Image (cartoon, grey):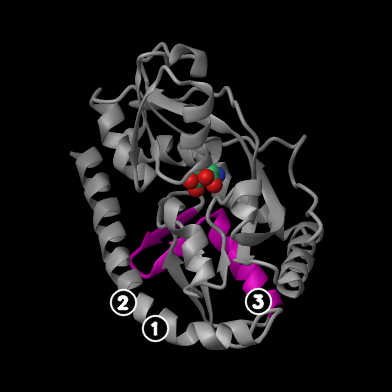
Amino acid sequence: MNTRRIGALIGAATLALTLTACGDDSGGTSTSGSGTAGAGGGSGAIKIGIKFDQPGLGLKDGNTYSGFDVDVANYVAKELGRSPVTFIQAPSKQREDLIATGQVELIFATYSITDERKQKVSFAGPYFVAGQDLLVAADSDIAGPEDLDGKKLCSVTGSTSAQKVKDSYPGVQLQNFDTYSKCLDLVVNGQLDALTTDNTILAGYAAQPAYKGKLKVVGKTFSEERYGVGLKKGDVALCEKVNTALKKMVDSGDWQKAVDANFGPAGFKVDTSTNPPKTDACS
Ligand code: GLU
């Protein structure tokens, strides 16, 4: 019952926000003109894309937003002198388009920096390094991606997680959804064998009261996911401002505070050999 309730809550939140996001689409079109006018970012209000259903990273609960991505986003917006912040749902597959069409100015949404994505957007950061892992039923004997042959695996369209499975584990039966939370109950009830995405996201789900004792993270990562801040392609000035803010967040200790506050409750151990990462040069 709890499981269903959480699923329903996440579903309702996602739906509510999808509707809000649709409402914003029309507004986004009219503001995109002014957005293009000023490289280096505008002033005043800012629209930022985050995930809405990833506890510990980006979660919408009523009008409250929480998670590591949210904390980093709020810190950067403050450093840029931009307020108020409006959070817009940024599902994996829609991220590049949300930026390209000016519906959001920045994206903090477990958004891995990749060469393919750099064709359409630019990235500040990285501000965190995660790794792809597997979430399975508590009694599963799947111990890593090599055990997935012939198994039913869940992931999300437009993610590096799904792409990695397609490229490296062709024997897997991959089923893609638009958000990761939709896979959870299917793994619990055995319709699917595993969910794959970043270890950060999986740890957040496994720690939800509804899933405690029912799901476990395998704990064997098989990729490096460098989380960047998505922004308009070629806006080097904005990218550099964001990087300055990210460096300040690390140097001041606020990055560590955000890590502890958001990953601590899930018992997620951050890899200190890769974190906090140095930012890349903007291009
Ligand atoms: N970090 C990966 C990506 O950017 C997986 C998580 C996600 O889909 O947000 O594709």
Coordinates of residue 138 in the picture (x, y in percent)? 37, 20
Alpha-carbon span between mark 3 and mark 1? 23 Å
Coordinates of residue 137 in the picture (x, y in percent)? 35, 22
**At label 3, which amino acid type do we have?**
Lys
Residue at position x 57%, y 51% from top? 111
> Where, quadrant-wise, is the N terminus in this rendering?
top left
Disc assigned to residue 78: 3
Tag 2–tag 1 contact (CB < 8 Å): yes
**Labels 3 and 2: the sequence-earlier one:** 2
Is 32 situated left or right of 254 in this image? left
Residue at position x 48%, y 56% from top? 58
Boundaries of the magenta span = 58-80
> Where, quadrant-wise, is the C terminus in this rendering?
bottom right
**At label 1, which amino acid type do we have?**
Gly
Alpha-carbon span between mark 3 and mark 2? 26 Å
Tag 3–tag 1 contact (CB < 8 Å): no
